[in-house]
Image (cartoon, helix red, strand yellow):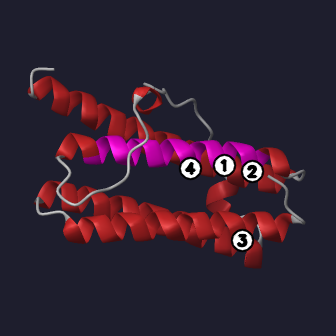
Amino acid sequence: MQFENLKAIIDFAIESEKVAAAFYEEVSEKEPFAGSKEMLKEFAAEERKHQALLEKFMTEGVDKSVAEYELKWVTDIKRSNYVVEMEYTEGMVYNEILMLAMQREEKALALYNELEKEVEDAASKKLFQVLAQEEAKHKLYLETQYDDYMAKMGD
């Protein structure tokens, strides 16, 4: 990816978060099961937090929560790495929704890792490292939910 400047990078990241939040919100409205609906709403809220963090970075600089954020290794179970690309269709079963969400979080993680390479200053690098780690946590949560669900189903 090529960007003109830091503002273009941040604007791109903000738009990506808006798209992700809108996706989770839209799917949550269509989901008939309360547990799935709630999980999707929680992911939408997380994406909105990321959006707000990026917007605040543009107006105020490094947020205290970013500056003090302790980066830690997040395990990658890699479930989404072995699945054919999926798109949402109304009526998807729970494990398919989990897999789709895993794929989306994997892409967000890759995006933030790439954007971190595009910036030069330490504050911007830290911001994208934090966002990448947050997406990695989401992916791990979804992969764990998927494994647990499939184990209950006898797979």
- Among numbered discs 4 and 3, the one appearing first in the sequence: 3
- Among numbered discs 1 and 3, the one appearing first in the sequence: 3
Disc 1 + disc 4, Cβ < 8 Å: yes
In terms of depth relative to the viewer, which is nearer, 40 or 64?
A: 40
> What residue is shown at x 53% (from left), y 71% (from top)?
18
- Among numbered discs 2 and 3, the one appearing first in the sequence: 3
Relative to 125, residue 62 above or below: below
Label 1 neighbour load within 10 Å: few <14, some 14-19, many 20+: many
Residue indicated by mark 2: 115
- Residue numbers of the magenta segment: 97-116
Disc 2 + disc 1, Cβ < 8 Å: yes
Residue indicated by mark 1: 112
**Mark seen at residue 11:** 3
Disc 4 is placed on an element classified as: helix
> What residue is shown at x 83% (from left), y 50% (from top)?
118
Relative to 22, residue 102 above or below: above
Q: Amino acid at mark 1?
A: Tyr
For marks 2 and 3, give the CA distance: 12 Å
Q: Is residue 96 left or right of residue 85?
A: left
Q: Position of residue 148 (x, y in %)?
A: 20, 29
| Residue 108 visible in image | yes
Disc 2 is placed on an element classified as: helix
Disc 1 is placed on an element classified as: helix
